[in-house]
Amino acid sequence: MYENNEKSGTVKNGEGSVVFGVFTDLHMDIMHDSLFRLRTFLNAAERCNVDFIVNLGDFSYPDRDFLNRETNGKLSGYKIDPRAFQCNRDDEKREAIRMLHSFKKPVHHVLGNHDMDICTRDQALKFLGAGRAFYSFDRGHHHFIVLDCNYVRGKDGKFLHFQHCNHYQYSNESFPFLPPEQLSWLEQDIMASPWPSVVFSHPSLSDSHMGLQNREDVWRMFHRVNEDKKRVILCMNGHSHIDGVTLRGGICYANVNSISNMWLGEKYSHIRYSKEIDREYPYLKKTAPYRDPLYAMVTISEDQVRLKGTRSTFVGPSPYETGYPVSGSEFPTTPVLSDFVLSLKSPDENFRKENPDTPLHRIP
């Protein structure tokens, strides 16, 4: 059974509790072992008997057969931007989608910036089997919100959705944005729910490095909705391929590390597997892959959030051993997705005591 939205569900782990699995940035167009990583996560989620799973974005480009159908058989004239990852993973992509469709619990997708590199938003959603780009659902006694932050703000102030690598035409300050209409919807949706809210996005709603450009607008709105009652308790994002938590204004912003790798770029390229794999997967050497897939299982109850992460090692030299700058990311680059426990009654005071090893920024 495959679902992209539901409004209610059974409660297993205490009245109102909910358990979900989360992963992000699989990047099938880069990684040679994507199916192994996805299968490992799905098996773990099944063992944990989760209520649902979440993909936080940058999953895969659509396969060629799908695009051929979407372009009415005109794929031969379909222009793919040269900055997109040029890969032939079609059989693997179809198998990955089959695996998700076969998972017995609801699957929720957040669109990542690279999911539209060779297609439109609607095509990306259709390929994933997702109904909408942003929406909300309830599970147990909690409210969950999926955002679509893949917007560029043009010089005229208008917002354009990512597609076909169009964001590369703009400065880094021009994206990503949450457009005003969606920000307004988000506030109304939070206020309309009787349950505490968890917000999923691809870019961070907190980080200054690679985070949402209009994040301060989001912070002000969160302050308003939380002023008389704790409505927003947790935000989770992918995109940055890092591990770390920011506590800001009583809200926990959690970076979920990539299930696959840290992207380093051409300057720090290093062949980490065989030459044969390097030839078939040409972008892999521009990453620092994690030997094992990273993902998390999250349990939310009335008084706490408990995240159980995973740990691995780098294949080959670490990013810093290749010369990658420490300032290149908001938190240190590590092959880890740290465990943490967040008290919903006093998140700022007790977090470091409960989680001495979790990378943390605390901001009033």
Image: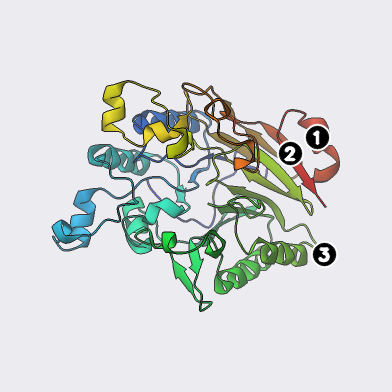
Look at the picture and state if 130 lies above or below 264. Answer: below
Q: Can you tell which mark lies on residue 294?
A: none
Q: Name the residue: 45% across, 40% down.
A: 265
Tell me if mark 2 has few (under 14), some (14-19) or many (20+) residues whose alpha carbon lies within 10 angstroms of its own. some
Residue 282: image location, x then y, percent: 32, 35
Q: Secondary structure at mark 2?
A: strand
Decide if residue 108 is on the left or right side of residue 193: left
Look at the picture and state if 347 lies above or below 123. Answer: above
Residue under label 2: 360
Which residue is most to the right?
A: 349
Q: Nearer the viewer, mark 1 or mark 3?
A: 1
Decide if residue 204 is on the left or right side of residue 348: left
Q: Quadrant of residue 96?
A: top left
Q: Earlier in the sequence, mark 1 or mark 2?
A: 1
Distance between mark 3 and mark 2 Cα atoms:
26 Å
Q: Earlier in the sequence, mark 1 or mark 3?
A: 3
Which residue is most to the bottom?
A: 156
Three-letter code, disc 1: Arg
Residue under label 1: 352
Q: Quadrant of the N terminus?
A: top left
Q: Can you tell which mark lies on residue 228?
A: 3
